[in-house]
Image (cartoon, rainbow, N blue to C red):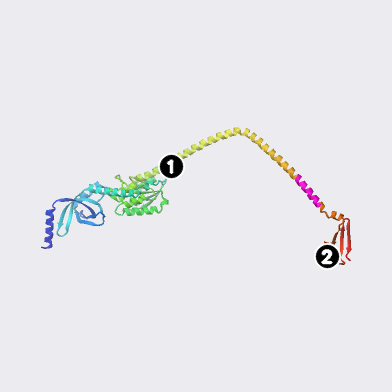
């Protein structure tokens, strides 16, 4: 038979043996909506490791079915169909002589996908819990005045504008410093982009008090990127308190769960920070009031103490004066006694010195019969100092005599 005949037999056999529709569990490995309104998928089944393909098949969702299924699925799950998502599809088996084997999608059960999404979210949270990091960011303390704010958001996001306007136009006149670190907030690159922005903030951690991740409005179906393990791990380990305002009212994402504080909208994030500063300002006012009261109380107590002391001053002065006069008299008497003793002792010393000087007087020595001999004005101390013919002068107590050595 020809190839066409063979393929025709396969088609007839499949139509005869499998005429009904079947509910099939599979994972979407590719998703390509066409310009004509159809959607072409590739479905796969993997082993438990997620690395080995066990089965693969093409699937087609024709225009009328796609226009009905897509909005219904997104409304029920809050997610759009995308690659990597596990789905439960109602399909019919078809075989075409040219295009081969494929499945035609008739329906999708969103409850199955919701269950899988919840399972994945639960597994991520359990993993973070096992690793001991799920509470790390909540253990950080938000500073008393969190007015230096790093923001991760899209540059064009209306939510970022709402956040800034709410902060800068606060009724209390509080001042805030806001620095935007741009990141993608939708699409497949959200996780990578947000983590890169977080790394940029972490490099300047000393410049900020808190990190705010805001997304603003948008489809709820775009929130699955915030159920990422890697993003949650970065938030949990971030060195600053993280506030998330992703702009939704549904169940918390994994990013919300590990963040320090989760609020619903960017505006709510701004209100949260304003309230923190207001609490600090109120505390400061209360402390100022208490300090003023304490100062007044202390001043009154000191005034009373001074008045009581002033009343005691005359009697205290009299006691102190008498005591000091006695001290001065004692010191004066001790000084006089010391001076008298010192003078007497020094007079005695002078008398002894005078006697010593008197005993050494040369005149007294001469009166005892000694003479003093000089030659050329010098005292002669030895016979060897004299020569024949030299004239000398002999000094007596009552005069001098000149002689010549013969």
The residue tagged 1 is 281
Q: Which residues are magenta?
A: 344-357
- Camera-nearest label, 1 or 2: 2
Main SS of the magenta segment?
A: helix
Q: Nearer the viewer, residue 108 or 342?
A: 342
Q: Is residue 403 visible?
A: yes
Q: Quadrant of residue 262?
A: top left
Say left or right for 343 vs 398: left
Mark 1 to mark 2 CA distance (whole Å): 112 Å
Q: Nearer the viewer, residue 190 or 137?
A: 137
Quadrant (top left, top right, bottom left, bottom right) of the C terminus = bottom right
The residue tagged 2 is 384
Residue at left offset 24%, top offset 51%: 86
Residue farthest to the left, as pictured: 1
Q: Is residue 223 visible?
A: no
Residue 231 image point, x, y percent: 33, 51
Task: Check the image and report above or below for 382 versus 68.
Answer: below
Q: Is residue 237 inside the magenta stretch?
A: no
Residue 137 image point, x, y percent: 37, 48
Task: Label 1: state its secondary structure.
Answer: helix
Say left or right for 350 vs 89: right
Residue 363 image point, x, y percent: 85, 54
């Amino acid at each position: 038979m020809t190839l066409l005949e063979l393929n025709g037999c396969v088609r007839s056999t499949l139509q005869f043996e499998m005429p009904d529709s079947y509910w099939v569990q599979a994972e979407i490995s590719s998703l390509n909506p066409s310009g004509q309104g159809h959607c072409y998928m590739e479905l796969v089944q993997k082993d438990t490791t997620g690395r080995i393909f066990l089965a693969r098949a093409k699937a087609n969702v024709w225009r009328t079915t796609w226009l009905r299924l897509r909005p219904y699925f997104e409304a029920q799950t809050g997610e759009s169909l995308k690659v990597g998502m596990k789905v439960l599809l109602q399909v019919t088996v078809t075989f075409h002589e040219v295009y081969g084997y494929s499945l035609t999608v008739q329906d999708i059960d969103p409850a199955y996908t919701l269950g899988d999404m919840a399972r994945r979210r639960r597994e991520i949270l359990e993993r973070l819990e096992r690793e001991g990091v799920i509470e790390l960011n909540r253990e950080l303390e938000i500073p008393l005045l969190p007015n230096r704010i790093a923001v991760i958001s899209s540059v064009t996001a209306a939510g970022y504008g709402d956040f800034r306007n709410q902060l800068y136009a606060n009724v209390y006149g509080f001042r805030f410093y806001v620095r935007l670190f741009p990141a993608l907030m939708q699409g497949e690159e959200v996780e990578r982009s947000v983590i890169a922005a977080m790394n940029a903030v972490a490099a300047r951690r000393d410049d900020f008090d808190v990190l705010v991740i805001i997304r603003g409005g948008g489809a709820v179906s775009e929130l699955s990127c915030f159920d990422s393990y890697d993003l949650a791990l970065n938030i949990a380990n971030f060195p600053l308190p993280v506030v998330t305002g992703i702009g939704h009212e549904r169940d918390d994402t994994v990013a919300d769960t590990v963040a320090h504080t989760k609020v619903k909208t960017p505006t709510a994030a701004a209100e949260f920070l304003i309230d923190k500063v207001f609490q600090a300002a109120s505390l400061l006012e209360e402390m100022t009031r208490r300090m003023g009261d304490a100062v007044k109380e202390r001043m009154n107590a000191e005034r009373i103490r001074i008045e009581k002391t002033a009343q005691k001053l005359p009697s205290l002065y009299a006691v102190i004066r008498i005591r000091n006069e006695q001290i001065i008299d004692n010191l004066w008497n001790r000084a006089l006694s010391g001076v008298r003793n010192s003078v007497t002792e020094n007079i005695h010393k002078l008398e002894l010195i005078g006697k010593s000087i008197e005993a050494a007087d040369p005149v007294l020595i001469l009166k005892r019969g000694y003479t003093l001999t000089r030659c050329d004005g010098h005292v002669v101390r030895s016979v060897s100092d004299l020569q024949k013919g030299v004239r000398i002068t002999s000094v007596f107590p009552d005069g001098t005599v000149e002689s010549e050595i013969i």
